[in-house]
Image (tube, rainbow, N blue to C red):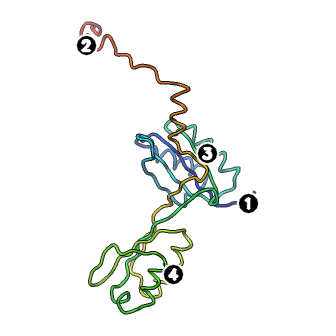
Amino acid sequence: MEKQEFTITLYTENSVGLIGRISGIFSRRKINIESLNTSPSEVEGIHRFTIVIHENEEVVRKLCRQLEKQIDVLKAYFNTDDEIVWQEQALYKVPANVVTEKVYVERLLRQYGASTVVIRQDYIVFETAGHREEIDRLTEELNKYGLIEFVRGARIAIIKNSAGIHEKVLEFERREPSAELIENEYLDKRDGVFTM
């Protein structure tokens, strides 16, 4: 099987140490993580990991099954680039004189939809979002004009054919409603119950 780029989407509880356990699974299988983003999801208390790897489909399928065995992982999905809507964000620090004196640079920034974040006498910081190839092309062009600094953010992605985790959580609650919370009858009688 041929290797290709996959985006893995994990829905998890927000617990300490989970990112270490998840990255450990990738390390043990000798799979390099190209990009990793974590954020809250559309459901309160559930977080979303977006992980980009370059691997073949069979390995990714097994990896997702392994990830779902983690106690705090609710669901793992994997998708190709055609099955998701995705973006990456980038910041560029460019010498101020280059932008003010070179019309081409200003046009280039407009062409890529870059917006100004900070303007100082010595430099200007721009931000843009797009696919990796677009960000790479803009970086390559700005390098010709003395790009001072560049940073790219991790991929964020939405699965095209998905209703999100919210529907799955509601469906699970309908099928298996949580039991009523039962107050411990001995809670306020601690000294009388736990005597030595």
Q: Residue at x 29, y 14 (%)?
A: 187
Which residue corresponds to mark 1?
Answer: 2
Which residue corresponds to mark 2?
Answer: 188
| Disc 4 secondary structure class | helix
- Which label's residue is closer to the chain start, 1 or 3? 1
Q: Give the crowd class for mark 4: few <14, some 14-19, many >=20 residues within 10 Å.
A: few
Q: Residue at x 40, y 42 (%)?
A: 16
In the rendered view, would you say 81 is above or below 181? below
Q: Give the crowd class for mark 3: few <14, some 14-19, many >=20 residues within 10 Å.
A: some
Q: Amino acid at mark 2?
A: Asp
Identify the mark at residue 140; answer none if there is no mark.
4
Q: Which quadrant would the N terminus be assigned to in this image?
A: bottom right
Which residue corresponds to mark 3?
Answer: 64
Q: Position of residue 30 (x, y in %)?
A: 60, 54
Along the viewing direction, whichever of 194 and 1 lies nearer the viewer: 1
Q: Amino acid at mark 3?
A: Cys
